[in-house]
Amino acid sequence: MATAVERVYARPASRARALAWPWAYAGESARDLRLDLLRGFCVFAMIVDHVGGASFAHAVSGAGEYFVSAAEGFVFLSGFVMGMVYSRIAEKEGLGAAMKKALLRSWTLYKLTVALSLIFGLLLVLWKYDIGPFESWPSWVANIVTLRQTIYLGDIPLIYTLLMATGAGALWLMRNGHTRWLLGGSFALWLAYQVNPDWAGNFPWPIDNNTQFHYPAWQIYFVVALVMGYHRQAISRWLDRIPRMPLVFATTVIFGLMLYLHLTGGATLPDFFQREDVRQHIDGWFIKGGAGPLRLLAALFTFQFAYVFVTYMWVPLRQLSGWLLLPLGQCALYAYAMHLLVLAALYGPLDQLNDNGLMSNTIAQLGVLLLVWGMVKSRFLFNIVPR
């Protein structure tokens, strides 16, 4: 069930303007279901990519090999929704109330991060898998509790904890008219990581075994989305000046070109781009953990296309996938936690699926997906696991 905060995060959207289309999203509730559907797809991609190996489902999820992964989508959507939700809280209850709720949410995420990391780590040890740097159990537990060490798949809730705490300070800046300072600081921190990742990667403190989600780089997705959500009305008024048809066409063409380059591996690019030194530079600018400049650009067009696609293809998408994706998207944090616990309990057998063929992996992935969906629908442990 959605919380009181979640229920008010968006007002009903009017039918897509300036482009008559019978399948367009028209706004069905006070909640923008397009965002839920997109988050639900991210949950789908996350589970499929974390279970087993190559499968038929990877043709839809991207297998984490596309220019943008589900993780960027989660972070961006979380920032956007936070901007919408907490701007309204600040308007109705005051800035102090909004900041307090953001910090309490961060505290909830912290507790979930520690609990999941400890449980998953202990089960990985039982399955005889590596959990990263280890001196002793007391030292390892202390590092997990103080967020100075993470483990595989425990790094995602950890960065959410930090980002939500960042959001509380960002609310103060935006409420006091310092949005430009917020964006400037976010860009400066991101740029520092691009220039010197060894130095900037220690901000806000060193985190052992954190190989993927580096806060100085990834915070830019969250902060930019937070600003967009907070100032959504002003941004909407500005976008209303742009003709819809050219925007939809341009977005679709650019995304199509990106997808073509991904599928062909860039083999059709001019010879200059096939040189080894050039390819190394390009690959470096697409690094996921560092949120390189080309990856940011790819994310910009991918997110824009996803939103346009869901807006104008809403009716068939809702009918075909809404039963699955909407519940998962509305309980995305819960879905992440429960899929991690399922993975922990079955990590050994699931890991052995990597070499068992496409069909075996597909069955396992869809099985875990439906199991988590069933947990959502039955509200399993809803009174314990946050949503």
Image: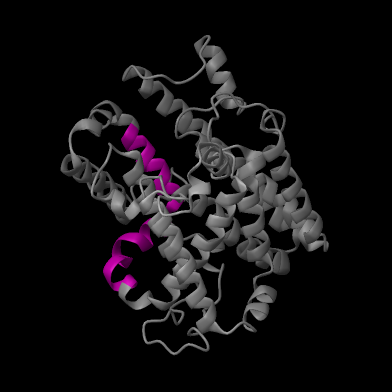
Of the 4 image quadrants, the one containing the N terminus is bottom left
In the figure, 178 relative to 311: above or below? Answer: above
Prevalent SS, magenta region: helix
Residue 268 % position (x, y): 41, 54
Q: Which residues are magenta?
A: 317-343
Q: Nearer the viewer, residue 58 or 80?
A: 58
Residue 355 in the figure: left or right of residue 335: left
Residue 79 in the figure: left or right of residue 59: right
Q: Residue at x 62, y 49 (%)?
A: 293
Residue 102 % position (x, y): 65, 51
Q: Nearer the viewer, residue 352 or 105?
A: 352
In the figure, 162 relative to 248: above or below? Answer: above
Question: Number of marks in the image?
Answer: 0
Q: Nearer the viewer, residue 106 or 358?
A: 358
Q: Residue at x 65, y 65 (%)?
A: 228
Q: Residue at x 33, y 16 (%)?
A: 128
Residue 280 % position (x, y): 54, 37
Look at the image and say whether residue 322 sits in the magenta stretch: yes
